[in-house]
Image: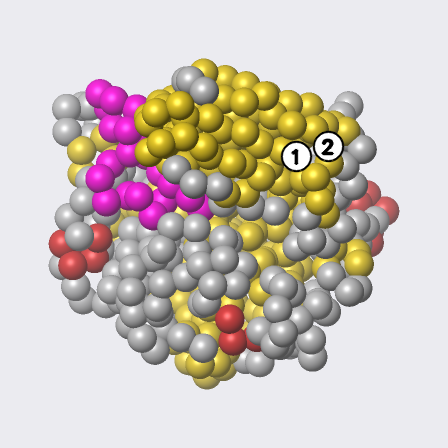
Amino acid sequence: MPTASRKYGTTAFGVGLDKFRPLETILSYDDFDLGFHGWTELTTNYQQDTVAIFPGSEFKIDLRPPMLSSATFPILGTHGAMNGTYSLKLATRARAAGAGEGIMPGSFAQCVKRLTWQDLGRVQFEMWFTYKPEADRPGVGENELRAFGVLWDIQDSQHRYFPAVRYLNAADGVMKQKWQFAQARAVSDEEWSGGVATTVSEDLKSAHGPQRGVDPQWYGRRYRDGSTDGFRDVPEGGQKLCYNESFNKINWHYLRFLVDTSTRAYVELQCNDRTFNLRGVQPTLADAYARIWNLLNLALWVEADTNRRCFLFVDSLVISTGPSRARPTRRRGKGR
Amino acid sequence: MKQIHTAVLERNGSFSEDFATEPYEAGWAEEAIFFVKIDDVEGIDPALTAQVQVSPDGMTWMNEGTPLPAVKQAGGIFTRVRHFGNWLRLTCQVSGTDANFSGTIFLCLKG
């Protein structure tokens, strides 16, 4: 099957795109030397009759604005990006709750890009990234960043679901360094999200809350070992990434995350030299929501483990699509 | 065409003591405006004052020299800054008896 780099050639985008392995159709190539490309802070929903968030969503009002960073650090000065000067930077505040507690506002930075899909099939996210806690104090700091992750938020004619992967780096200061995928444990919707309303119903007359599986980066009980009701370990998913030897040195990493919306299933996760086979694994399916038909959102997040700011830097990324290899596509949504 | 971006540094915050906005990298921009939108004010003789600060590393902060006009009631106020290097923040002081300000702080960048 032709790859996009063969299709477009390296001359169309230069070396910037050639370091990716996109599928046939590139929906978005986001080089952060050129702007934000629609990546914006995620904000929570509002009630129908008042400009007020839903009670219980307080931790979602401070997911921190992303910035275009030159990766300027103390002692060293400016790193710049992998190519060019700027990367997209997610930054937490200098705070965190314990790994077994609920999310403290500001300790969790998340941004989102909002798209819709045309055909069911494979969708792939790739990025060159790095991560670091703030170099504001002595100490290597590797065990002060809890996790970072990538999340698809997809809706077809029947279901909303969230294929997501995260790198659990540390929990309460204990190194974990493993990949996990989102798949909810067998808990009730009440146990999953606390029964709080988060979205207005289709008829505007009521509101409902997240079912089990929705927004796994936040919901589901959290445990002191860093596990949650929303994520499970990738088999043989331990991977020690190049953090470097000091608090002010960064190295760029490659990530590729492939899912198939025609089967509503994970396919593959790659980080640097490791490729994890996730074929046959399904994210948790929730009922479709009003107003988000054909939703194809992508989110990135980073989470602090201590009272030290934590950062995720993304040099560039590519979102691409292609036909499913599992079965014929064009299972179009009907009967809404 | 120039780039422009507005970041919400504090959203519906409640400010009753001195604070600073989170460090924000803006080296790509040539000009910036800090907007402070106050929705509600409480206390006796409340006043919110602020100064723009710059930094070489996002940790060592110095007054850039641009103050924000004192805020004493609900409403909007802003201050402009140029030639700021990379890092920007607004450091704010709250004075008065039982003073509290509720509102939002925006940083609008263009370059």
Left or right: where does residue A14 sit relative to residue A242? right
A191 displayed left or right of B20: left
Residue occupying image coordinates x 20% and y 30%: A201
Is A42 inside the magenta-drawn segment?
Answer: yes
Residue ID at (18%, 23%): A203
Give the dominant element type of the magenta stretch: helix, strand or loop.
Answer: loop
Q: Is residue B111 magenta?
A: no
Label 2 residue SS: strand
Amino acid residing under circle 1? Val
Expressed as whole percent of the image width and height from the top left, the position of residue A150 reads: 49, 57
Query: Which quadrant of the structure image shows residue B108?
Result: top right
Tell me the subunit letter for badge 2. B
Disc 2 marks a residue whose amino acid type is: Gly
**Quadrant (top left/top right/bottom left/bottom right) for the N terminus of chain B:** top right
Quarter of the figure with residue A126:
bottom right
Which numbered marker is on residue B65? Answer: 2
**Region of the chain picked out in magenta, as a range:** A40-63
Pinpoint the chain carrying mark 1.
B
Residue A273 appearing in the image: yes
Residue A149 visible to the viewer: no
Q: Quadrant of the C terminus of chain B?
A: top right
Q: Is residue A129 above or below residue A100?
A: above
Total count of labels: 2
Asked if marks 1 and 2 fall on the same chain, the answer is: yes
**Whole-Å distance between the Cαs marked 1 and 2?**
7 Å
